[in-house]
Amino acid sequence: MNPGSYRLSRQVLQQMIDQEYDELFNQNETIYNTQVQGQSYSQQSQRNIDELFTTTLSEPLKKMHASYLRSVAKNCYQEKHLDDHFPNLQQVELCRELERQKIMGKFEKYHALARDSSKFKYQDCIFAANNNLNRAIACIEEYVDNTKNDNNIIAAQFKIDYPNFA
């Protein structure tokens, strides 16, 4: 049987990707991958951040991106920009960026502000913790919780700003 014709489920493929990622980037042995079967705080926060795009807003963002691509195809690839004698790549790129801002700009701005807010709270908390390990761990745990709360806040704002995609 040809290995290219295997049909693997999403879960198996995701496990393969996770295993390869762990082999590449988690080369240090820690208690999280030897003694305790769990995830480090870094892995938890990254999972929470990714969850917004993989589950919470996956379908609406796909619809939004498809709308963006249709708009770009309609508005940015006009004959006047694609002349063989004078291709105007800069004009096409500018048009694509303007279309992206029209369709996704509000979401991207709000997403960045929400994530930055959590990062700043975390940095301020770590600074205030100084050399107190228990307070620093509490800051990290609070940051992990904030990443999860940010997902809910961003998703709620997305539904308000983009009811046609939700």
Image (cartoon, rainbow, N blue to C red):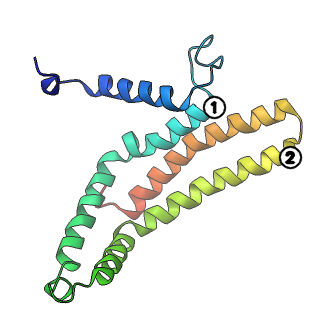
Q: Quadrant where the C terminus lies?
A: bottom left
| Numbered tag placed on residue 128 in the rendering | 2
Give percent across and percent down for residue 90: 33, 82
x and y percent of residue 62 in the render? 28, 52
Please tell me whether mark 2 sits on a helix, a strand or a loop.
helix
Residue occupying image coordinates x 43% and y 24%: 19
Across and down, in percent, residue 151 comes to 50, 46
Give the residue at x 50% y 65%.
Answer: 109
Type of amino acid at the residue the image marks with label 2: Ala
> Which of pointers 1 and 2 lies earlier in the amino acid sequence?
1
Q: CA distance from mark 1 to mark 2?
A: 19 Å
Left/right placement of residue 10 relative to residue 27 reads left
Above or below, comparing residue 120 to residue 25 in the picture: below
Measured as percent of width and height from the top left, residue 80 is found at 17, 89
**Residue at left 28%, top 61%?**
164
Near mark 1 (Cα within 10 A), the count class, few <14, some 14-19 or many ≥20, is: some
Pointer 2 local density, CA inside 10 Å: few below 14, some 14–19, many at least 20: few
**Image quarter (top left, top right, bottom left or bottom right) of the N terminus:** top left
Nearest the eye: 157 or 101: 101
Name the residue beneath numbered marker 1: 41
- To which quarter of the image does residue 159 belong? bottom left
User: In screen coordinates, is 32 left or right of 16?
Assistant: right
Farthest top residue in view: 35
Left or right, residue 16 beside residue 69: right
Where disc 1 sits, the SS reads: helix
